[in-house]
Amino acid sequence: MGPPCLTSPKGRNHLSPPTPTLPSSCPAVAREPSVAGGGAKGPCPAWPPGVKSPGEKSRYETSLNLTTKRFLELLSRSADGVVDLNWAAEVLKVQKRRIYDITNVLEGIHLIAKKSKNHIQWLGSHATVGISGRLEGLTQDLQQLQESEQQLDHLLHICSTQLRLLSEDADSQRYP
């Protein structure tokens, strides 16, 4: 593998160094020939530290959290709840890998399902309906079990009272 400036991220060597991507508004481009000639990469040296170039996004803007919210917004706006993942990646201006990260999680919690290779469908409302119906059934089961428990407690109380009365009754005892 060659020097870092001659190697792409995938490890393939290039014959020429990468061309700089400094904006024309950067004052260092006109003044410093070493910067203008290639070899400088990243924000303009004349900018204060921590200031990003106009086209650079912050960590929050590229976060998976914000991207997921924006993806769900796209999904909610679709008429039939179906979204093309290629289109979503273009609209959101993110790598398709990020879209896959989002869809894998949503599919894992049964909020979406794959319709085809690049199309997913929202199931959230259907899943919610099933859950609420199940919750009602479980609530009714719980109520019936609580009523049965009360009846059994009452019967136990009656039996223990009768047993105590029988054991205390002089006529029931064989030997004094």
Image (cartoon, grey):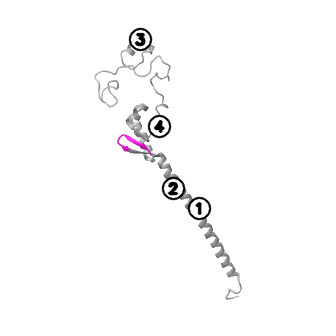
Q: CA distance from mark 3 to mark 2?
A: 70 Å
How crowded pointer 1 is (Cα within 10 Å; few <14, some 14-19, many 20+) is rated as: few
Q: Quadrant of residue 167?
A: bottom right
Q: Residue furthest top?
A: 31
Q: Quadrant of residue 114?
A: top left
- For the residues bearing labels 2 and 1, Cβ distance under 8 angstroms: no
Secondary structure beneath label 4: helix
Q: CA distance from mark 4 to mark 2?
A: 28 Å
In-image side of 170 versus 89 (left or right)? right
Range covered by the magenta-colored residues: 115-122
- Residue 116 place in picture, x, y as percent: 35, 43
Q: Is residue 52 magenta?
A: no
- Residue 159 place in picture, x, y as percent: 64, 76
From the image, tell me which residue sits under label 4.
77
Sequence-first disc among 2 and 1:
2
- Residue 149 place in picture, x, y as percent: 60, 66
Q: Is residue 144 above or below residue 133?
A: below
Query: Mark 1 belongs to which amino acid?
Result: Gln
Q: Which mark is residue 30?
A: 3
- Name the residue rendered at 62%, 69% in the picture: 151
Query: Mark 2 belongs to which amino acid?
Result: Arg
Q: Quadrant of the C terminus?
A: bottom right
Sequence-first disc among 1 and 4:
4
- Name the residue rendered at 34%, 30% in the picture: 9
How crowded pointer 2 is (Cα within 10 Å; few <14, some 14-19, many 20+) is rated as: few
Query: Mark 3 belongs to which amino acid?
Result: Ala
Sequence-first disc among 3 and 2:
3
- For the residues bearing labels 4 and 2, Cβ distance under 8 angstroms: no
